[in-house]
Amino acid sequence: MAHWHDYKHGRQHSVVGNLLIRRDVHSPELNNARDILVWLPYSYDGERRYPVLYMHDGYNLFDAFTSFSGEWGVDETMTALAEEGLEAIVVGIPNNEHRLQEYSPFPDPRFKMKSSAGEAYLRFITETLKPMIDSDFKTQPEPWATGIAGSSMGGLISLYGLLTAPHVFGYCAAFSPSFWFGQGALYETLSHLTRPTGRLYLDVGAREGRHGRNYMKGVRRIAEMLRERGYNDANFRYVEDEQGEHNEASWARRLPAALRFILPRVPQQA
C-alpha cells in the first residue's frame, strides 16, 4: 500500500468517503502512464473481501473539481447503496489525450483512426491493473465479482470487454454506448455471441444530441440482439430514458438503479 495515498481535497472538492490515488501507473500494453483512483467502502476493514467495479473517465466519477463536464457522484451513490447492503471497491481509470483510440476496439477512418487501442486498453485493465488491485486491496477476484462500466465511448469499451473477456468480467453497465463508432462493428461482434457472458445493464436517452431518436434506435438494436442471444430479465436490464441527455448529469441520475441491478450481493462476514 506504500504507493497509494489519500486523495487530497478541500472545500472546492466534492469527494465523500475514502478515496485513494496512485500516481503514474505505467501500462506496458499502451506504453503510457496515468493516475488510478480507488474508492473504498466505509466498512473496509477486517478480513472481508469486496467486489470490484472498474470505471472509465476516472476524473469524472468522484470529484466535481477534476471533472471536465460534471461528476457522476459515484462516491455518494455507493455510500447510499451501502445502506441497502450493496458494497464494492470502485476503481476509477482516468482517460488521457488518446481517449478515442483507447475506448474503441475498432478503427474508424472517419476519425482518421486506421488502428485502435481498445484491445490494448482492456489488456492494461486485465493484465496490469487488476493484478495490482487484487494484490493491494481486499477484493473478490473472481469474474462474478469483477465488473466494468462507462458511458459513451466508455460504454462501448465496457460492453466489448464484457462480451470478449468473460473470464475476467462478470457484470457490466454500458451507459449510452457509442454503438456507431467503427461504422457499427459492434453489431458484428454481437452477431458472433452464442450465449450470455454476464450480468448487463444497458441504457440510452431520448435526447442524446441532435439525433436522439436515432441514437435510441441504435442502442435498442443492441438490446434486441442481446435478447436474441439468450439475455433475459434475470441477467439483462435495458432502460430508455425519455429525459436522458448525453451528459454526466443523466448518467449520474441512472447510476443508482444500474448498480442495484449489476452489483453482486456478498454476505457480510462475522
Image: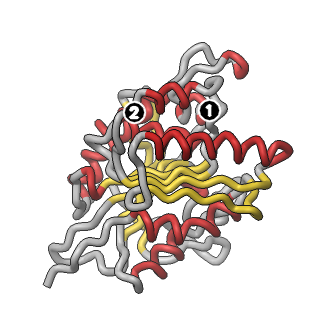
Q: Residue furthest front?
A: 228
Dot in front, 2 or 1: 2
Q: How is the image coloured?
A: secondary structure
- Residue 199: percent from the left, percent from the top? 38, 54
* Amino acid type, residue under disc 2 in the picture: Leu
The residue at 29%/36% (across/down) is 127
**10 Å crowding of disc 2: few (<14), some (14-19), many (20+):** some
Q: Is residue 162 left or right of residue 153?
A: left
**Does the residue at mark 2 contact the one at mark 1 (Cβ under 8 Å)?**
no
Asked whether residue 26 is in view, the answer is no
Element marked by disc 1: helix
Q: In this view, does 8 lie above or below 128?
A: below
Image quarter (top left, top right, bottom left or bottom right) of the N terminus? bottom left
Distance between mark 2 and mark 1 Cα atoms: 25 Å
Element marked by disc 2: loop
- The residue closer to the viewer here, 240 or 157, is 240
Which callout, 2 or 1, points at the residue further toward the start of the chain?
1
Q: In this view, does 17 lie above or below 250?
A: below
The residue at 59%/50% (across/down) is 151
| Residue under numbered circle 1 | 100
- Residue 22: percent from the left, percent from the top? 40, 53
- Residue 170: percent from the left, percent from the top? 32, 51
- The residue closer to the viewer here, 118 or 259, is 259
| Residue under numbered circle 2 | 193
* Amino acid type, residue under disc 1 in the picture: Leu
- The residue closer to the viewer here, 44 or 55, is 55
Image quarter (top left, top right, bottom left or bottom right) of the C terminus? bottom left
Instruction: Determine which quarter of the picture holds residue 53.
Output: bottom left
Q: Is residue 130 left or right of residue 135?
A: right
Q: In this view, does 23 lie above or below 255?
A: above
